[in-house]
Amino acid sequence: MICAKKFAILNYSTLNFLAQSLKLTKTIYLNQLLFFLGFALLAICCFVLVEPFSVYFFSIDGETLEPRVRDFLVWVRLTTAIMGLLLALLGLRIRERSLPQGGVILLTLSIIFSLVFVDIVARIMALRKWGSAFATPLPINTARKEGESALTPGVYASQVSSDYDPSYRDRVFFTINQFGLRGHLPKVPKPVETFRIIALGGSSTFGYSVTDGLDWPSQLEKKLKPHGPFEVINAARPGATTSINYPYLRDRLLRLEPNLFVFHEGFNDFWRAVKNHDRDWDRYSAVDETLPARESPLELSEANKWPARPLFLTYYFGEWLNRRLKRLERPSRDELEKLLAYDPAIVSIYRRNLQAMVRLSKSKGAQVVLTTFAACDDPSLPESEQRLRLKYTLHVMPELELKTAQHGMDLYRQITREVADLENVPLIDLAKLLPKDTRLFTDTIHFTPAGEEHVSRILAAELTKWLPRKVAKKD
């Protein structure tokens, strides 16, 4: 009874404050103002900060919350609830004290108009940044959800910059088709006259820093067209390793009837090997070549659309919060010492998986070309310049020092060369052929538009030495 009575009093006080704010009564009291603020915080706690409302307001992709953001919002929700209860209880304890009505109304209107003004500014910024003041873009990392075998169809966007050129800024867009591939939708079954090439790798093959049509697989197709009926499909996925790409190749890509695979692997395996060594990522393992391909439709879901949001301010806050909460911790000196030589058991995973991918492709009648992953690392430069060039590598792998990072990159490139010899497949050594020019890179391994064009030029020159004979022999 007592609780019900207090609850009724609180509700009455809140309604009375709202009525007074609308000039339906003459006086506003401090205790009633505290009641109102307390209930407002509790309402925010119960509705805005809990799922699915928090997802609607704060998520970057409009569907899920980053784990760090979700954990942070739990603490914010708890703090908000405590503050709301304390303000409500304080309103019960203090005596009635009248406040200037005009001042309270003016303060309330000022807060409302300030939020509206800031949201208008955020929408103008979004219009300039993305070309839309009503919908927010989907970042490309939301296209590959946990457990999915391909990218989710849709249009995605990203803002890119350069570690080497402070003035470099670009807005890029990615189109994922119904097969979960970047770019145009390939025909299945494949036209008889078409020589189909599939490029497979991670973000540096996907073209993470360039918009549609500027990635090196797209440019490679344009350069090969004059030499025959060539088609190049970009089947890369950001962050993918050989452990992920082998079942992707087995279950989906071979059904596209490729004539040739170009594997640009190595860096992500290097990255995951370091993380696996530190037990930060336990899903990196040697593939099982005895498992059969899974039967699933090539056509995936409908294309994702950019989600519309009621407040752009909350979107920018969620974006800022996600960046701020990503804290990287350096390991102890003992852990660094263990990484100096790298764990042979983990390093061997890359060799075994890459060999498995080559063998599987050849067993299905597809040719294979391996490439070493290109980067702008240059051990001959002064240490400060080396550190700048490996800034991205040292950021994603803070466990490593400069020398251990360089050693790891060289090690995984050498394994690629050895696999090419063991499996008797051609090798295009991009790590040596591509100039170490920072104008070609946005960071250690991702390319600028000029870099993508340069890679496609090198690959076209190497492939045309023997590809026309392959096409002629096939015909």
Image: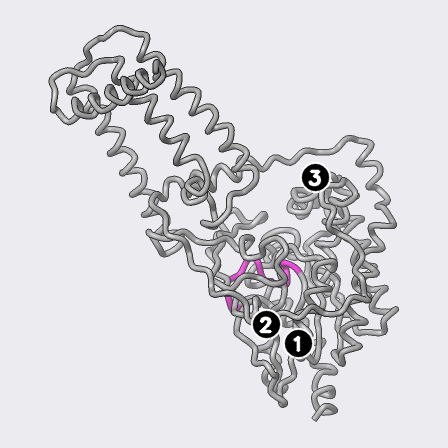
Residue designated by label 2: 298
Residue found at x 25% / y 16%: 32
Q: Quadrant of residue 400?
A: top right
Q: Is residue 208 above or below residue 54?
A: below
Residue found at x 55% / y 35%: 325
Which segment did they paint magenta? 202-213
Q: Quadrant of residue 43?
A: top left
Disc number placed over residue 398 in the picture, else none? 3
Q: Position of residue 445 (x, y in %)?
A: 65, 55
For marks 1 and 2 on the same chain, the one whose residue lies earlier in the sequence: 1
| Amino acid marked by disc 3 | Pro
Dot 1 falls on a residue whose secondary structure is helix
Residue found at x 74% / y 60%: 242
| Amino acid marked by disc 2 | Leu
Which quadrant does the C terminus fall into?
bottom right
Q: Residues within 10 Å of mark 3 (few under 14, many from 20)?
A: some
Q: Tell which of 91 and 145 is nearer to you.
A: 91
Disc number placed over residue 321 in the picture, else none? none
For marks 1 and 3 on the same chain, the one whose residue lies earlier in the sequence: 1
| Amino acid marked by disc 1 | Arg
Give yes or no for residue 417 being in the magenta stretch.
Answer: no
Q: Is residue 355 above or below residue 71?
A: below
Which quadrant does the N terminus fall into?
top left
Q: Position of residue 29 (x, y in %)?
A: 21, 13
Dot 2 falls on a residue whose secondary structure is loop
